[in-house]
Amino acid sequence: MRAVVQRVSEARVIVDGATVGEIGLGLCVLLGVGEGDGEKDAEWLAEKMVNLRIFEDDAGKMNRSLLDVQGAALIISQFTLYGDCRKGRRPSFIGAAAPEEGERLYEYCVRQVESLGVETACGVFGAHMQVELINDGPVTLLLDTRKEA
């Protein structure tokens, strides 16, 4: 699984002109599921996201986690994180999981984040979405479960 994690002061996702998910302080996460990913990947990623110490403490150092600041997570599916652009001009998405498995693992990851005590909001799997956010910092990190070690 791959995730683009952004520290935000607010974020929302819009589908067909309606806001379907919205948070204040927290993380906006673009989440892609790859071929061969499983529940262990989702569990690792959820634990990593909620415990990353990327929020500032009283001294201005990044020492607090999403749990510490009682922030929320807006988690949006994005299979294009598996776009391979090395050849030609059109990305290949052969590395992305099939839609049914991608949706299952995306939803499983969201449930894992919730089970760790974080309020979550989501987009709509497979829909055309517009994402609005205020990246705080800016702080943007890439997580990949295949690069754990």
Image (cartoon, helix red, strand yellow):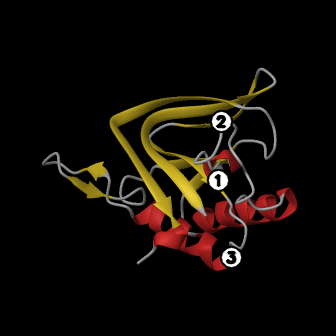
Q: What quarter of the picture does the N terminus occupy? A: bottom right
Pointer 3 residue: 39
Query: Circle 2 sits in a helix, a strand or a loop, which is it?
Result: loop
Query: Foreground: 56 or 1?
Result: 1
In this view, 10 is above or below 6: above
In the rendered image, the residue lying farthest to the right is 100
Q: Is residue 55 left or right of residue 133?
A: left
Q: Mark 1 and mark 3: span between their CA atoms?
A: 18 Å
Q: Nearer the viewer, mark 1 or mark 3?
A: 1
How crowded pointer 1 is (Cα within 10 Å; few <14, some 14-19, many 20+) is rated as many
Q: Which residue is mark 1?
A: 82
Residue 102 in picture, x, y percent from top left: 77, 60
Q: Residue at x 42, y 60 (%)?
A: 67
Which amino acid type is marked by label 3?
Answer: Glu
Q: Earlier in the sequence, mark 3 or mark 2?
A: 3
On residue 89, the disc is 2
Amino acid carrying mark 1 in the image: Tyr
| Extreme-front residue of the structure | 88
